[in-house]
Amino acid sequence: MDKQKTGQPYIGFADGNKMDFPELIQEKRSRMKIFMVDAEKDLPVKKITLLLKMAIAILEKK
């Protein structure tokens, strides 16, 4: 489900399979999850900030 297929922007997370967040979508690639962004609405800054903090915490554990 990339932007070309849906027409919607998204934020992709490598190692997203290690992230537990209900709005992340598992793609065909086993490590990737994506967070869809509605181009017609304001960015959900709090959710994006939380997701980025989760992703950084996973990277720091490596």
Image (cartoon, rainbow, N blue to C red):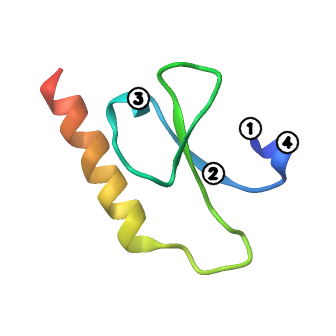
- Measure the alpha-carbon separation of dots 3 and 2: 16 Å
- Real-space CA distance between mark 1 and mark 2, rounded to the nearest whole angstrom: 9 Å
Query: Sequence-wise, which precedes: disc 3 or disc 4?
Result: 4
Whether the residues at callouts 4 and 1 have beta carbons within 8 Å, the answer is no
Q: Give the Cα distance between marks 4 and 1.
A: 8 Å
Q: Quadrant of the N terminus?
A: top right
Mark closest to the chain's N terminus, 3 or 2: 2
What residue sits 70% from the left and 55% below the top?
9
Residue 24 x, y percent position in the rendering: 50, 47
Which residue extends farthest front? 22
How dense is the environment of label 2, judged by Cα within 10 Å: few (below 14), some, or many (20 and up)?
Answer: some
Left or right: 19 with respect to 24?
left
Residue under the point 26% across and 46% down: 54
Disc ID at residue 10: 2
Q: In the drawing, does residue 17 fall left or right of residue 33? A: left
The kind of residue tagged 2 is Tyr
Seen in the picture, residue 31 relative to 44 is either above or below; the reply is above
Mark 1 lies on residue: 1
Which secondary structure, mark 3? helix
